Image (cartoon, coloured by chain):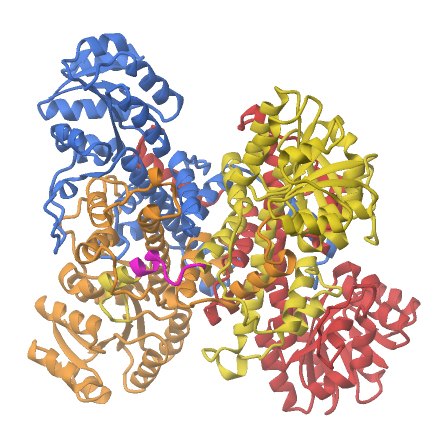
Chain colours: A red, B yellow, C orange, D blue
Amino acid sequence: MQLGIIGLGRMGGNIAKRLMDGGHTTVVYDRSTDAVKASVSAGATGASSLEDLVAKLAKPCAIWVMLPAGAPTEDTITALAAMLAPGDTLIDGGNSFYKDDIRRAKALAEKGLNYIDVGTSGGVWGLERGYCMMIGGDAAEVMRLDPIFATLAPGLGTIERTAGRTKTDDRAEHGYIHAGPAGAGHFVKMVHNGIEYGMMQAYAEGFDVLKMKNSNNLPPEERYDLDMTDIAEVWRRGSVISSWLLDLTALALASDAELAKYSGSVADSGEGRWTVEAAIEEAVPIPVLATALFARFRSREEHTYADRLLSAMRFGFGGHVEIPQ
Amino acid sequence: MQLGIIGLGRMGGNIAKRLMDGGHTTVVYDRSTDAVKASVSAGATGASSLEDLVAKLAKPCAIWVMLPAGAPTEDTITALAAMLAPGDTLIDGGNSFYKDDIRRAKALAEKGLNYIDVGTSGGVWGLERGYCMMIGGDAAEVMRLDPIFATLAPGLGTIERTAGRTKTDDRAEHGYIHAGPAGAGHFVKMVHNGIEYGMMQAYAEGFDVLKMKNSNNLPPEERYDLDMTDIAEVWRRGSVISSWLLDLTALALASDAELAKYSGSVADSGEGRWTVEAAIEEAVPIPVLATALFARFRSREEHTYADRLLSAMRFGFGGHVEIPQ
Amino acid sequence: MQLGIIGLGRMGGNIAKRLMDGGHTTVVYDRSTDAVKASVSAGATGASSLEDLVAKLAKPCAIWVMLPAGAPTEDTITALAAMLAPGDTLIDGGNSFYKDDIRRAKALAEKGLNYIDVGTSGGVWGLERGYCMMIGGDAAEVMRLDPIFATLAPGLGTIERTAGRTKTDDRAEHGYIHAGPAGAGHFVKMVHNGIEYGMMQAYAEGFDVLKMKNSNNLPPEERYDLDMTDIAEVWRRGSVISSWLLDLTALALASDAELAKYSGSVADSGEGRWTVEAAIEEAVPIPVLATALFARFRSREEHTYADRLLSAMRFGFGGHVEIPQ
Amino acid sequence: MQLGIIGLGRMGGNIAKRLMDGGHTTVVYDRSTDAVKASVSAGATGASSLEDLVAKLAKPCAIWVMLPAGAPTEDTITALAAMLAPGDTLIDGGNSFYKDDIRRAKALAEKGLNYIDVGTSGGVWGLERGYCMMIGGDAAEVMRLDPIFATLAPGLGTIERTAGRTKTDDRAEHGYIHAGPAGAGHFVKMVHNGIEYGMMQAYAEGFDVLKMKNSNNLPPEERYDLDMTDIAEVWRRGSVISSWLLDLTALALASDAELAKYSGSVADSGEGRWTVEAAIEEAVPIPVLATALFARFRSREEHTYADRLLSAMRFGFGGHVEIPQ
């Protein structure tokens, strides 16, 4: 089927490509004309503006917005809403906050427009592996767009099937789900990213313990000079902690076990933060996910005011003495 | 080659079976005669005592001890050490503390005995998937035993190879490594389990946030009745957090999304605890791994003295008032 | 000076009393006529409604609202705003969210009304000890109300003065500060409560470690049957961790070292939650404050879905085996 | 009474002084002859060696060892044990690990020597405020030394007495307790320091949130330029979180609100680490105390290997893209 796509960054561009590879047609727009040209050369119909894109789509149309969360997505959806007709559909495939989805869906519904939120996981590997999608919105509309989702999803692939599944809806096994009403897709994706933070931090801490086992502070007979690269590799096979994140770790370590090119300042995006807020609203304890987020905050500071205050207190009660305080 | 195996629980029994399936011969002993019988019926030579097992092995012999860490393993190794001759080898395939390995290796070396520690991951699935092994001890002796490890390991299998590996030693790609001198195998396995705790807690917290999104405490328009089973399933395909632990989660949820048969009291074993202690010795911050351990401690208490003390303080400063305190 | 007071719970009632003891006059209202009567018998002028209260105050008037945060405070302020005249002042002495203060101050300013937010600490002890106040709003208006604040505050008292203070503004030393513009008072109070959560949890965990040192799981020669009551008492004198919270702990333990009357389900109020959200907005790591909040969430559940999921995973990879997994 | 004192650092020197001020006599030794001279000029009898000190003490003697934990204390106690006669007493007033106390007490008892462990809190302020002491060892011997402890302790002072105490033993109210058998003193002191870490981190995090409320990353209308010095001061009076640590914080902030002279690298000593290990042995969850320890570890690293690994994974799945991953 035909899909409009706005935003041709690494995610949007690859989504367009995977759809066209799967036999769909796309009309694409990006504020970068180079990005549009690249998609056009891959078979897309290019648009020169939002208006042009809408004009080039058959009715009722569906437009996939793949932009950074916040103002870029919000402004684009607001602008498009004014150009569309009842029955048309807007899809937010980015990382919007799920409460924004709830608000938007309600506002758009008053104009007869459909709104679908799609949490999309897969990163730069999605073109090849397919995208794992968590979808929120009206069930019938999600079903109408099924050909799009089915093509973007990884499909059954070679992954062993889970024994004992009794669901008649096999979309989950193909790599996409209709999670619930507006916002449910982004909510599930948000928690997915929260878990991702926790898992990443678990690996990171573990490898740190392995790496520092060669520290001069330890008794010589208890030091080991361990091989990070081989450890990551061996855990990929038969261990309890094999995962795709471990595969990526093995890949990174294979090229440089010291990871010297990384500064160690780790960014975070909205999902990790929103997961903490969602947990607080639910009164669900998530110490590991929150701590993983805080580790990223801490990684970006050389020293915190908190640290200096600790030192000041220590000085206050102990002078410089290291014995009993 | 020939291997003595002591301890025929689920791990030891399956190890014997996988070795025999791979063409090796085994002499086995367990204090349960039924366990010995089962192995014998699968092709092993049974022994009626440690002495009998040693007597039935060709020299120099190698004996794999697969018993719970602590006294069972320690006592068995001490007893065997008195029966063996220089050149013989003891393998501890259990979950011993790595400092015990260092001590034992030193003591046994004085008698001319070899000591090899093998951290073995794979659980009840190892028979089929193969065992991921992290091995510590003398390099030459580890190499001499290579046929055993190569058979127990998963091998290359169907797992995609890591691009860019420049190592000439391909054992890691077959699922086993020689991590370093005595204790290094169990040390790496210990950290593996520490990471496992962190990852498991990350998933557990995330699913809790999803599950509780239907709580009565939330505004009705912000509640979702999410399908845990389908969410676990969809994340297995193309998402950043796909893993073997997630596969197991999907399996568990497929049979009961409420997980009603589990009490929620979660045990912990030595490795998680030792990982925290190792990190403290190295002064490496591992808040996520430690917090995951503490979550298990907490799961086993209905209410803690700590909780009651919080309530007592709250009563102390606020009476029963809920406004400013 | 004259002050209107709305809300005569333990906090509001005591505030009225302390003000009257200090020579001020009050006009009071509460939806409970008994509460009004009690204040009237202590010297206050009673009001039968918000309108009545406003009518009984001289112009320009100042009204202290001391109600639970959220709807009770919001609705009352909205209602009062419609009754007041330019130059009048509303004081929110409760635990409102500081962003609500910013919003309200702006809206009220458009009507020529002043809005002052006062974070008030002291609990049920405030009547006797005085209230520690953190005040936000227009500096001149805060100064105009200074007689009120000076009376409510603890004053210099017997607390040793901090050496080296160079501030000319000595309000801090008397127990109240003008923290900044609208919301700043409640923001500082919010963080105060966040710290309170962390300190309480620190004590609670420590006493738990002391209490459980007599556990049957420990080797008999390493068990101690420690006296919680005396430990709390001794730490009050000369130790680094003496504090008012410790004083309260000693008091609670003196009456029952087992704290048997407390269930261990610990409530939390908005400030702890908002502190986490504020830290996230600032990207400041606060693992201890957040973890303390989560410990309260956890205290209210017998078992979590998260716990059961951990058990399910453990079963998945290890069967019931307790050796290597 | 007469007491031998070994180790005249800030703690030991002040202990000698406070004892002499209280009418006791001391025989002192330190490897620094200047330190000995200083004590002698304050009234002590100086000793030129351990042997000399023992020779100058009347029998049965009591010697207070006030040295850094670990080798300095261990070696000194071992050396002294060879010089003493049955009935003599060794007091370890430092921060030894309580299991070392248990071991030492047992070994010394075989020689007829008494061993008393004293956890001593008070830091450089102890000379003036008195020392809070937690004492382990034989009850009769602790009672025999009571004049020493009574003099060193703060005494009832001006601190308000705890209502409802029914204990006949009033030592706790004077600032010292007999906690239990050998090691119990240091165990209670260890947990005291563990709590101290947690409280300090709670304050540190809170002040960080206050300080960063002026960050450029926040919307201008939600920024506050808060006065750290006045906030610390105001919380000292009537607030729930007043404490001695807060007094010290106020003192530090009064001289420099930026705390610019502190690097932010925060040391830790054994007690914080041992508290975590003790909690793990007891299976008691102490996420806040452990996290506080880890924050100190983290403060001493510019960037960790863990941080770089996070970045490497992020690069792995997301390229440099900041949108959906």
Q: Residue at (11%, 52%) from the top-left corner?
A: D166
Establish if B235 lies above or below A139.
above
Q: Is residue D44 visible?
A: yes
Q: Which one is nearer the viewer's eye here, B71 or D233? A: B71
**B59 or A255, nearer to the observer:** B59
Q: Is residue C167 above or below residue D95?
A: below
Expressed as whole percent of the image width and height from the top left, the position of residue A211 reads 63, 36
In the rendered structure, the answer to whether residue A198 lies left or right of residue B296 reads right
Write the start and end of the magenta stretch as one range: B300-310
Q: Residue at x 85, y 87 (%)?
A: A58
Screen quadrant of the N terminus of chain A = bottom right
Which residue lies at the image location 53% right of the left edge and 65% below the top edge? Answer: C308
Q: Is residue B46 left or right of residue B211?
A: right
Q: Is residue A69 visible?
A: no
Q: Quadrant of residue B76?
A: top right
Please, is residue A269 above or below residue B166 in the view?
below
Q: Position of D116 compared to B178: left or right?
A: left
**Displayed quadrant of residue D135:** top left
Look at the image and say whether residue B45 sits in the magenta stretch: no
Question: Where in the figure is residue C62, as x and y percent of width and height?
Answer: 22, 75
Q: Where residue B42 sits in the image (x, y, percent)?
A: 76, 50
In the rendered image, which quarter is residue C79 located in? bottom left
